[in-house]
Structure formats: structure tokens, C-alpha cells
Image (cartoon, grey):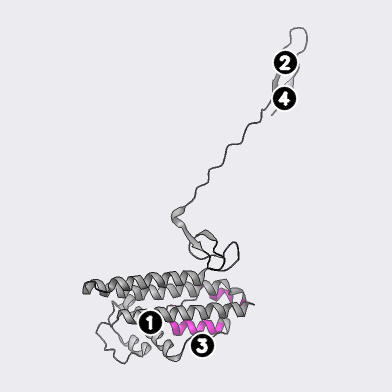
Amino acid sequence: MEFETKPKGGFGIGISLKVQPRRPVPIHYYREKQLETEVVCSNCTLRYSVYGVFAFCPDCGQHNSLQILDKNLEVIGKMLDLATGAQKGVAERLIENALEDCVSAFDGFGREICRVHANVSTDSTKVDRLSFQNLVGAKQKVSALFSLDLAAGLTDDEWKVAVLAFQKRHVLSHNMGVIDTEYVRKSGDALAVVGRKVNIDAGEVRVLGKIISKLGRYLSEAMKRIGS
């Protein structure tokens, strides 16, 4: 846009336009802090923030899925602590919520760890539809997609305890905690009576938390071996 017109004749008028540089206006960035999760890498101790929950450490490259699972289980343990000494109705609700959160935590972890390793699956398009809210169904799908036995990370008794607890969570979420024939058939609960409310105690949920932690570590390590 710069130009210069020189004067002509004795009384001519010259016109010019010059652009003078100036300091650039700084760009203001909008940070959505409410959408960020702050993480301290368990491997290299780097502190970083991510949108959402799961991410790779920008320094050492370790994925934080197992770390997030542990944090969730830690919070669930505190919920169960609150249930001790609480009024009966409040205690029951805290224990039920803790059970549901256990299953949700493992479901989120399982989905993410499989998504990260989808490139070594037999069909990456099916990985996105994986669910870990039903352990028996998840075991079958993980076996088909990754040739990995999910139950191999636990003893037979631990697997049965986990399956039973996951079925209790299902009847809580979908049938107000009232036992139906499907629950009896899938859970293997010898004490179940159709029409009655399923029984859940804090000790049972604490045991489930330990089992989920063990299963999470097994699945994480197994996926690393498959991908290496």
C-alpha cells in the first residue's frame, strides 16, 4: 500500500504513504481450566495438564491410564471410609455408589488401554465399541481382538468375586437393585432370591477395588508385551 508521488512543476504537490512498523499486538489465549486435569507422571514426576483425563506424559511418554485408575480407586476407598459410622440409608448409598464407581473406573481404564493399543488388534474398528462393564463379555471380546485372556491376571476365586460384583452393579443401575432371573443366571450368587434387593457391603467393595487394581496392572503389562 506504500506509494510516493513527486511534485511536478513549480507549484506541484507531492503525496506519499509510508507504513511505520510497530510492536505486534500480543495474542490472548483462552484456557479452559475447568476442562483440564492436572497429572504428575508416576514415572518421571513431570507435572502437566491435559484436556479430559487420559494422556501420554510429554517428557517420558508413559501413558497415565493405570495412574488414573489408581487415583479413582483411592477416592472410592475414601467413600467407603465415610460410610463407616454414617446413618444406615446414607451408608448404603455410599457403598452402592462406590461399587458403581469401581466398575466405571475399570470400564474407562479398559477402554483407554485398548484404544491406545488398537493398532495391534485384529480389528481396530471394533476396539472403539469395547465395554468392560460386563467382565464375561469383555473377556470374550479382548480374547478375539488381542488374543489375550483377561481372566489370566486373577485367580479363579478373584475372577468369580469380580464377576459377581459387576453383576450386582448391573442390577443396581438397571433394576433399582432388585434381583431378577438374569442376575441369578449370570452372577452365580447362591444366596440370590428373585424379587429381593441385592446385598452389598463395604468389605466386598474394598476387595473388588484390590482385584480391579491387580487386573488393571495385568492388562496394562500384557498390552505392552503385545505391542513390543
- Coordinates of residue 16 in the picture (x, y in percent): 70, 21
| Residue assigned mark 2 | 14
Disc 3 or 4, which lies upstream in sequence?
4
Check whether the beta carbons of the residues at disc 3 and disc 2 lie within 8 A of each other: no
Callout 4: SS:
strand
- C-alpha span from label 1 to label 4: 81 Å
Q: Residue 152 — which label?
A: 3
Whether 45 is among the magenta residues is no
**For discs 2 and 1, the disc positioned in front in the rendered view:** 1
On the question of residue 121 being in view, the answer is no
Mark 4 neighbour density, 10 Å: few (under 14) some (14–19) many (20 or more): few
Is residue 42 positioned above or below 162 on the image? above
- Coordinates of residue 191 in the picture (x, y in percent): 29, 91
| Residue assigned mark 1 | 207
Disc 3 or 2, which lies upstream in sequence?
2
On the question of residue 147 being in view, the answer is yes
Disc 2 or 1, which lies upstream in sequence?
2
| Residue assigned mark 4 | 3
Q: Quadrant of the N terminus?
A: top right
Q: Which residues are magenta?
A: 120-144
Check whether the beta carbons of the residues at disc 3 and disc 4 lie within 8 A of each other: no
- 2 sits to left or right of 74: right
Instruction: Say which amino acid is labelled 4.
Output: Phe
Closest to the observer, 167 or 215 = 215
- Coordinates of residue 44 in the picture (x, y in percent): 57, 65
Disc 1 or 3, which lies upstream in sequence?
3
- C-alpha span from label 1 to label 3: 18 Å
- 150 sits to left or right of 97: right
- C-alpha span from label 3 to label 4: 79 Å
Toward which corner of the image does residue 102 lie, by quadrant?
bottom left
